[in-house]
């Protein structure tokens, strides 16, 4: 749940995924287990008590309760219990995910100053390195100044006489892949150093290295390195091929995509990517993307129908088909799609066809795909379909919240039954798998779609009111990026953060500072002004960008 909340990166969705009641129930369970161990272990069982604290701290970090994790760590130290490097690693990782890097650095320095056992270990230094790589969630990239301290940590590691291990090298290679411009020379240097140190690369090493080759647009070199690893006896899993497939498909290189697919299946005997738990991701999805980029929507649809015939479709199949429907001429990785020049009505028809095919296959759309379809329906004059989809997203969030309340009851019951987790397992088995939901950005996108469709201001006002109500019920302040996106949307500037696709109506401005492309109605200006006042009252200073956009629109509208 913590990982999913990080990936969402949206406070509203995080409040569902990390339901406070559920988190409290889980932590009370671990606290109860710690108390039981302390009561029964006696004075001579510090190891058992220390392990119970380690588990509690780990749970706090997983549930993003970093302050509580540090409170338990301080208690552990005051009691004379000796934390092991796993505890240090968990806390440092938590600092990275919470973007509290200074706190993590101070914590690590305090360990060194106290000469804590295990502080000068590969595990602890690796955690420090990984703290910097976790400061942004994927797919966000890192800038050189954001990773410089990670490389300094490696230097300090060597100066302390601690030899880098496989995890160290894997982490550094991963950092190279996370850079805005993938640092292939440095990644290859790390791989050579690793080999020279006598450390054999694992399947994780190879897969991480392939991420760098893919992002650096060096597929032939990556493929050669992959073959080299296979011939050296490394048990490479399917995930190693994915970055290369992705880059080849994004370039529309059908021949190379087919060669990579054949090679992956020949080496691994699989056509589905590993390590994605309950989610199926067929490698043949990249055939759909490659053919669509090269030859357009009809070619992508034909590839998808062929995959359909053999039961090899999943949500990603349709995500790629939709990407092709709205834009095919591009040279960058997915996320920088560019229109192919087709008339809007053709692109709208393609997007609708992709959606209908997905519905026929019973595949539930992702949140981002729903956001983009809002714009399609607005352009088609079908705004009611967007409203229906948004209602379904809100219903899914309610289902997930209800499931988490049921799960919280199970944890509470387990805490009072001596730690028997069978009831928790049963609750998890019975819980529905919810793959949809709504977020603050869902509100931004449905409001944008209504404006594009020239819906009455009263409908827009109703959505803004619903957002305010939901934020109040969850005790959430409206984050600055959301407030700014809403204000810009209401005054006619499509924010860069908006996910919905625009077909006709208001087009995206040329830059962040562009004036409104068409004057908003008086009703929308009133809604924007009221929202601005509410943000100022409830959340402190409103976002400057949104304020400037609103002032400019009010001045343009005149007295």
Image: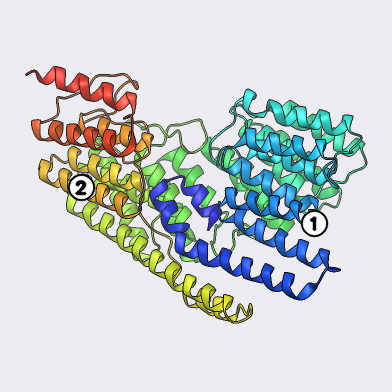
* Distance (Cα) linking label 2 and label 1: 52 Å
Q: Does residue 51 sit above or below 244 in this rendering?
A: below
Do tag 2 and tag 1 residues touch (Cβ < 8 Å)?
Answer: no
For disc 1, the neighbor class at 10 Å (few under 14, some 14 to 19, many from 20) is some
Q: Nearer the viewer, residue 187 or 220?
A: 187
Identify the residue under disc 2.
465
Q: Give me the disc on residue 98.
A: none
Quadrant of the frame with the C terminus? top left
Identify the residue under disc 1.
81
Q: Nearer the viewer, residue 393 or 100?
A: 100
Q: Which quadrant would residue 437 be assigned to in this image?
A: bottom left
Which element type, helix, strand or loop, lies under badge 1? loop
Residue 221 place in picture, x, y as percent: 72, 34
Determine the residue positioned at 30% across, 50% down: 472
Residue 305 shown left or right of residue 267 in the figure: left
Numbered-mark total: 2
Determine the residue positioned at 23% across, 47% down: 377
Kindly tell me whether residue 13 is visible in this rendering. Answer: yes
Residue 165 place in picture, x, y as percent: 85, 43
Residue 209 shown left or right of residue 473 in the figure: right
Which element type, helix, strand or loop, lies under badge 2? helix
Determine the residue positioned at 76% across, 65% down: 49
For marks 2 and 1, the one nearer the N-term is: 1
Residue 76 place in picture, x, y as percent: 73, 55
Residue 511 place in picture, x, y as percent: 34, 20
Q: Which quadrant would residue 556 be assigned to in this image?
A: top left
Q: Nearer the viewer, residue 223 or 123?
A: 123
Closer mark to the observer between disc 2 and disc 1: 1
């Amino acid at each position: 749940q913590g990982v999913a909340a990080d990936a969402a990166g949206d406070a509203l969705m995080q409040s569902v995924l990390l339901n406070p009641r559920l988190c409290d129930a889980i932590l009370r369970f671990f606290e109860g287990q710690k108390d039981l161990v302390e009561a029964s272990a006696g004075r001579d069982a510090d190891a058992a008590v220390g392990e119970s604290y380690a588990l509690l701290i780990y749970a706090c970090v997983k549930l993003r309760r970093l302050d509580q994790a540090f409170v338990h760590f301080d208690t552990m130290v005051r009691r004379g219990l000796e934390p092991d490097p796993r505890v240090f690693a968990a806390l440092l990782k938590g600092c990275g995910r919470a973007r509290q890097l200074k706190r993590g650095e101070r914590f690590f320095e305090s360990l060194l100053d106290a000469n804590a056992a295990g502080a000068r270990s590969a595990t602890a230094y690796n955690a420090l390195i990984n703290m910097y790589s976790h400061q942004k969630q994927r797919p966000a990239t890192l800038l050189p100044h954001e990773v410089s301290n990670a490389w300094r940590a490696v230097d300090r590691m060597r100066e302390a006489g601690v030899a880098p291990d496989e995890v160290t090298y894997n982490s550094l290679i991963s950092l190279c892949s996370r850079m805005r411009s993938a640092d292939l020379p440095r990644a290859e240097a790390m791989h050579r150093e690793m080999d020279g140190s006598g450390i054999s690369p694992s399947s994780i090493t190879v897969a991480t290295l392939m991420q760098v080759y893919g992002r650096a647009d060096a597929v032939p070199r990556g493929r050669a390195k992959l073959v080299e690893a296979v011939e050296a006896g490394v048990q490479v899993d399917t995930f190693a091929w994915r970055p290369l497939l992705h880059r080849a498909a994004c370039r529309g290189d059908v021949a190379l995509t087919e060669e990579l697919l054949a090679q992956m299946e020949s080496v691994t005997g699989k056509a589905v990517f590993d390590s994605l738990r309950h989610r199926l991701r067929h490698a043949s999805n990249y055939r759909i993307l490659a053919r669509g980029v090269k030859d357009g929507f009809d070619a992508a649809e034909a590839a998808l129908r062929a995959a359909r015939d053999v039961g090899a479709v999943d949500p990603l199949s349709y995500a790629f088909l939709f990407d092709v429907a709205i834009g095919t001429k591009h040279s960058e990785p997915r996320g920088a799609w560019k229109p192919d020049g087709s008339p809007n009505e053709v692109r709208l028809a393609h997007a609708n066809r992709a959606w209908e095919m997905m519905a026929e296959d019973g595949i539930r759309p992702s949140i981002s795909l729903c956001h983009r379809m809002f714009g399609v329906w607005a352009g088609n004059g079908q705004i009611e379909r967007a409203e229906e989809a948004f209602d379904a997203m809100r219903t899914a969030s309610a289902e997930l919240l209800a499931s988490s309340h049921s799960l919280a009851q199970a944890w509470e019951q387990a805490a009072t039954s001596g730690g028997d987790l069978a009831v928790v397992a049963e609750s998890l088995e019975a819980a529905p798998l919810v793959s949809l939901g709504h977020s603050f950005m869902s509100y931004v996108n449905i409001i944008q779609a209504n404006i594009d469709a020239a819906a009455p201001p009263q409908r827009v006002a109703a959505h803004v009111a619903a957002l305010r109500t939901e934020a109040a019920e969850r005790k959430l302040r409206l984050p600055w990026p959301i407030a700014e996106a809403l204000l810009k949307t209401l005054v006619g500037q499509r924010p860069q953060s908006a996910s919905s696709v625009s077909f006709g109506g208001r087009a995206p401005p040329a830059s962040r500072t562009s004036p409104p492309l068409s004057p908003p109605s008086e009703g929308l200006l009133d809604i924007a002004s009221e929202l601005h006042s509410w943000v100022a009252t409830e959340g402190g200073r409103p976002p400057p960008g949104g304020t400037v956009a609103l002032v400019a629109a009010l001045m343009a509208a005149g007295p």
